[in-house]
Amino acid sequence: MKKKTITIADIARLAEVDKSTVSRAINGSDKVKPETKLKIQKIVEQYNFRPNVAAKALAKGPIKNIAIIVPDRNISRALISPVFPQVVYGIGNVAAKHDYNVTIVTTAKLDDNEYLKIINNHQADGFIIMGVGLNDSFPYLFEKENIPYIIIGKFPDPKIENSVSTNERIGGYIAAKHLLEQGHRDLLIFAGNEQWFHNTLRVNGVRAAFEEIGLEFPDDNILMNQTTPQKGYDTFTGLIRQGRNLPDAIFCFSDTTALAVTSAASDLGISIPNDLSIIGFGNHFFSDFIRPKLTTVEEELDRIGEIAMEQLVQIINSEERKIANIQLTPKLVVRDSTRSR
């Protein structure tokens, strides 16, 4: 005969305890008396209640979980970008060493109520949030609730320090400096989502490089929201067909956009790098295989994931919920898509 599927409320009634005691027991809390935990464990096993999670927790101690939150700024594109899997790979490597399970959570909204729902629905020991928007307020919620968290990306408010990121400003600076040293002056930026803070930081780096030689970088040369390869392709094609003079160089804030612009240039009979220099950001696996090989800014995405998880474990195991912001220095990888004028 098939055993009845029961709820936590049923287990609480059978064990003659309240639901919170059952929840604590299932999550391995040491605040539950051993005899009570054993009683609950027997009921869990008898009714086969979530055997892969609950019974294991009761028998072997607490299950360790962390949740990766992917904010809804074009989730589908975030999940298939080269950035996401590299960061998650790094997180997973360290999580496995510390016996943590990893859950990926996507959000439908970006307000505090949505984050509270995620916190309550996913009984995680800590959270890693992928990416930072200019108007995000979630870190203040995590701080208020004293919940362990790490942000992948630098937060606009310097008071929020729990983050691991590439030094985006330096990334923008070294790319622009390279192009300026080659004699390029008319530079276009193909940036990503205008809500992502890292785009602002990269633009600031470009401005700094121009200011060093007494030039001001024009706002009109910043083309935001080039969030897909198709948009990058269409934007470049549209500019040329509308009569815009061919720029000296284009700095794409992702290697995928750089690949698309390279393809568009080829379709228009524009030679890279003889007529136009292109530089990307990321140094993803395909950057060395396209033709011409892509000059790009390299960021250590898997290492960012590893450090984020290492820091989160440290926060979880400590009463101190804060760590200093950690920024990894990017480096320029010069290949064949840029040349001197």
Image: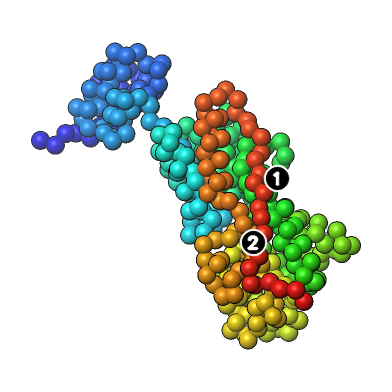
Q: Residue furthest right?
A: 214
- In this view, the residue in front, 268 or 107, is 268
Kindly indicate the quadrant of the structure image that contains residue 142. Answer: top right
Name the one closer to the observer, 125 or 251: 251
Residue type at numbered disc 2 = Val
Is residue 135 found left or right of 40 in the rendered image? right
SS at mark 1?
loop
For label 1, the residue is 156
Against 313, residue 91 (above or below) is below
Q: Is residue 280 above or below residue 238?
A: above
In the picture of the structure, the residue carrying the numbered disc 2 is: 333
* Residue drawn where x is 54% and y is 30% of the image: 314
Give percent across and percent down for residue 137.
Answer: 64, 42
Question: Residue 245's quadrant in the figure?
Answer: bottom right
**Which residue is located at x 64 percent, y 49 percent?**
166
Which quadrant of the figure has residue 164? top right
